[in-house]
Image: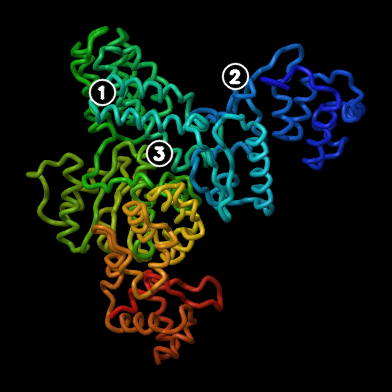
Amino acid sequence: MTGGHSTALRQPDVAEIVRSARTRSGVSQRDLAERSGIGLRTLREIERGRVAAPRAGSLHRLAKALHDPVMLAQVAGMADGEGPVYQAGDPLVLRILGRFSASRGETAVAAGTPKQQCLLGLLALQVNAVVERDEIVETLWGVEPPDSFGQLIHTYVSRIRLLLEAHQAPDGGRMAVMRRGAAYELQVEDDSGVDIMEFGRLTREADRARAGNDLVAERAFLDDSLRLWRGRLLEGMPEALQEHPVAAEWSRRRVAAALRFADLTLAREQCEEALVQLGPLARHEPLHEGLHARLVIALAGSGRRAEALELFAALDRRLREESGIGPGVELRAAQMAVLRGDVSEGGAPAVRPTTACADGVRPAGFPQSVGDFVGRVEHHRIQRYLTGQGSQDVFGAVPIAALYGPAGVGKTVLTTHVAASVARHFPDGMLYARMRTGSMPEIRDLLHDFLGALGVPAGGLPAGLNEAVAMYQKLVAGRRILVVIDAAAGERAVRPMLPPGPGSAVLLNNRAPLSGLEGAQHFRVEPFTADQAVLLLSRIAGESRVLCERGAAEALAELCGGIPLAVRILGMRLAARPHWTLEQLAKRLADENRRLDELVVGDLAIRDGLRSGHDGLGPALRETLRVLARGAVRAFTAREAAVVLRRGAWEAEEQLEQLVDRQLLEPPAEAGDGYVFLPLTRLHAREP
C-alpha cells in the first residue's frame, strides 16, 4: 500500500489481519461474533479467506469489538467505495483541550475502552513526566479499585503502546509509553503531537513577545493558543481526571491567557474578537469576576448594552446565592462604565478591568512557583480534599490540609503548587502567611496583614490580638477564601487564623504533624522516588545528559535519600559544570565525610534545612539522636536502641517516637521492623 490505505485489502491480508487481532486478544470466534454482531459463519469465512470483498464496515466492527489498535489502524483508511482517508505521513495527534480525541489527518482514531482513554488522557495531561501507579489507580477507580487493578493497568498500557506503534508516521515525532519502576511516562518529541504541549509553546512565545514589548505578536500567539481549546479540559472524562491538579493548573493558564488577550483586544477596540474567546470560557468559569467584567465591557462595546447589564445582574444573583457576597470592585467598575456610557459601540472602553484584582484578594509574599516542579501523588489527594471531593469532607466544616515531612522534602514547593491549582475554587482570593516564631505579637502582625488585604485601612487596624481576631472572623465569614500558612508554628499559633465558616479552606505545612489541630487532615510529604529524582535532575541539568547516565542519576538520588532540595542542589551544580559527568559527581558524594559539603550551591545548603530540625530539641533528645546516628547500624528496634542508649525500653521508645514526630527518624514500616534514619539526617546528626 502506498500513501494512505487502499479501499480494499487483498483477501489473504484480510484473513491474516482478523486472525492475528483475534489471537492477540485471546477471543474465540464465537465470542467475537457475538460482540461485533457479525454472523459466526461469516466470520469463519473471512478468516479462511473465502469472502471475496468483505465490507469495510464489518472490519471496523470487528476491530472495535476487539479493541485492537493494530487492526483499527490497518482498517482505519478503508471505506466502502471511497478513497484514502489519511496519508501515511500524517502524524498521530492527541487532543485533550476539550473532549479527548486521537486523530491522523482528518480521521479520528479509535483509542480503546473508556478506561483506556482515561489512562491515555492522564498520561497526555502530564506528557513527558512520570505518573505514579497510585495516581493512576485513584484516577481510574477512586478509593475502591478492583482486585485486578494491576493487571488492568498493564493491559491498558499494552494496548496504548500498540496504538502508538500502529500509528507511528515514518517522519513523525516519536510517541511512546515508557515504564519507570511502578510508574509510566508518555514521551512525545514534537509539541504538535499533543495539543496541550502546543498550547504551552504558544503561551511561552507570547510571554517572550511581551518581554520584548511586541504586543502585536503577543496578541497573535495568545489568539492561536486559545483557539486550540474546544471546551473544558478533558471534557466528558471522569471528574477525578477533570479536577486533577495538573488539569486545574492548565485551566488557570487558559484563563490567564484569555484575560491578557481580552485586555490587548479591547485596547484595539476589537470587542467582537474578545467575545469569541471570552463567551465560551465564561460558561466554564461561572464565578470568575475578572472574565465576566471583561465580557460586560466587550458586550457593551459591541452594541449589546442590555445584554451586558443582564450579564452583570445574573452574576450578581449567582454570587449572592452561592457565596453570600456581592460583586467585587472590578465587576462593579465594568457595570458603572456601561451605565455611564463610558463604553460606546465600536469604541475602546474608558474603564477596563485590570488583572491586578482579577482573582479577589491577592496574597503578599506568596512564594514563586518553580518551573521544574515534579508532580506527586500527594498533590492530587490534597487538592481533592481542599475542594470538597475527598472522603473526609464533612458538611459545614472548613477543610484543613496539614502537610508535614522531613527537612528539604519540598513542603513549601508543594504547598505553593497546590494553592495555585485550587485557587479558582476560591473566588474571593487567597491569604498567605509565613510564620517564624508563632509568638502572639507575630500572630497579631500577620492578622493585620490579612485585614489589610481584606480592605481594612491602616488606621482602622485594632491594637489587640483578640480584637484583630474578631474583626478577621467577621470579615471572612461567608466568603470563599483559601488561607495558606507556610511553616506553621504550632496549633496555638494557627487557630486564630482559621476562617469561621463553610466555603473557605486552609492549607498549611510544618515539619511535625499538628496532631492537636481539630478537624485537620494530615498529609505526609514523602521523599522522592528514584524516578521523580531523576526527572527533577533532568529538568535542571538537561534531559539527554541525565538519561545517558541514568544509573549514575539513580545513584545520586539514593545518596541524597530522595530529598528534593538535595537533588535540586546537585542539578544546579551539574548545570553550572557541563564538563562534569554524573558518575563523577556520584563519586564525590560517596564519601560520607564530604557529602554534606558537596550539597551546597550559591546560598542553598542542605545543612541549613537539617539544622532547623534540631531547633527546640532538649538536651536528652539531642544526645539520643547523636548516639544513635553514630552507631554502627542504620536500622534499630526500640529494644536495640534501649541497649545502645543504656535506658529503659519504655523511655527509649518514647524518645524514638518524639524523634519520629520531629521527622528526624523514619518509623517502622511494619510490625517488627526498625526505626531508620534518612541518609542525610544521619550524617548531619553525627557531626559535632
Amino acid residing under circle 3: Glu
Q: Position of residue 478 (x, y in %)?
A: 30, 41
578 left or right of 88? left
Amino acid residing under circle 2: Glu
Q: Mark number for residue 615?
A: none
557 left or right of 569? right
Q: Position of residue 256 (x, y in %)?
A: 33, 31
The mark tally for this picture is: 3
Callout 1 environment at 10 Å: few (<14), some (14 to 19), or many (20+)? few
Circle 3 SS class: helix
Tag 1–tag 2 contact (CB < 8 Å): no
Circle 1 SS class: loop
Looking at the image, the residue that sits furthest to the left is: 459
Q: Does 347 appear above or below 568?
A: above
Amino acid residing under circle 1: Asp
Tag 3–tag 1 contact (CB < 8 Å): no
Q: Does 311 appear above or below 361?
A: above
Q: Residue at x 57, y 56 (%)?
A: 181
Could you tell me if residue 348 is visible in this image? yes
Q: Which residue is mark 2?
A: 106
For marks 1 and 2, the one nearer the N-term is 2
In this rendering, the label closer to the viewer, 3 or 2: 2
For marks 3 and 2, the one nearer the N-term is 2
In terms of image quadrants, where is residue 147?
bottom right
Along the line of sight, the residue nearer the viewer: 31 or 373: 373
Q: Which residue is mark 1?
A: 214
In this rendering, the label closer to the viewer, 1 or 2: 1
Along the line of sight, the residue nearer the viewer: 504 or 531: 531
Q: Position of residue 280 (x, y in %)?
A: 42, 21
For marks 3 and 1, the one nearer the N-term is 1
Cα gap from disc 3 to disc 2, whole angstroms: 30 Å
